Image: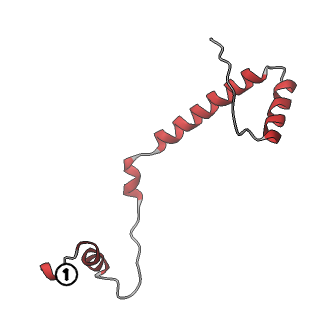
């Protein structure tokens, strides 16, 4: 494992103090704790990306917009595409 020196801006002071305290309590260096936290964050982020599945679109259920909304789709098309006079 290669080591890299980094400087990080806009770190919340209180969060950093708590993070450092936990690292000291666990008897690991802050750099190693940060590496572990970043690896965990990457793993969690990859899980979220994999959960996005096109098949989820099939789970969308239709719903009723209420009375007088039977031709709502056609009315929206008229507004967006100006198709009212093209029929």
- Judging from the image, the colouring scheme is secondary structure
Is 51 situated left or right of 6 in this image? left
Is 27 situated left or right of 62 in this image? right
For residue 73, what is the image quadrant?
bottom left
Q: Nearer the viewer, residue 87 or 71?
A: 87
Q: Nearer the viewer, residue 32 or 51?
A: 32
Q: Is residue 59 above or below residue 13?
A: below
Residue at the left extreme?
Answer: 87
Is 67 situated left or right of 15 in this image? left
Q: Is residue 70 above or below residue 50?
A: below
Q: Which residue sits at x=83%, y=24%?
A: 26
Tell me where residue 57 appears, x and y as whole percent: 38, 55
For residue 21, what is the image quadrant?
top right
Tell me where residue 82 appears, x and y as whole percent: 22, 76
Q: Secondary structure at mark 1?
A: helix
Q: Is residue 56 above or below residue 36?
A: below
The residue carrying pointer 1 sits among few (fewer than 14), some (14 to 19) or many (20 or more) residues within 10 Å by Cα, namely: few
For residue 15, what is the image quadrant?
top right
Q: Which residue sits at x=80%, y=39%?
A: 13
Please identify the quadrant where the C terminus is shown.
bottom left
Tell me where residue 7 appears, x and y as whole percent: 69, 27
Identify the residue position indicated by label 1 in the image. 84
Please identify the quadrant where the N terminus is shown.
top right
Q: Which residue sits at x=71%, y=27%?
A: 34
| Total numbered badges shown on the rendered structure | 1
Q: Nearer the viewer, residue 82 or 41?
A: 82
């Amino acid at each position: 494992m290669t080591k890299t020196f980094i400087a990080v801006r806009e770190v919340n002071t209180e969060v950093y103090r708590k993070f450092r305290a936990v690292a000291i309590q666990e008897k690991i260096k802050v750099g190693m704790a940060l590496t572990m936290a970043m690896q965990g964050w990457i793993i969690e982020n990859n899980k979220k990306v994999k959960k996005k599945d096109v098949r989820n679109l099939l789970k969308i259920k239709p719903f009723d917009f209420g009375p007088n909304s039977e031709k709502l789709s056609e009315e929206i098309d008229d507004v967006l595409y100006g198709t009212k006079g093209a029929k």
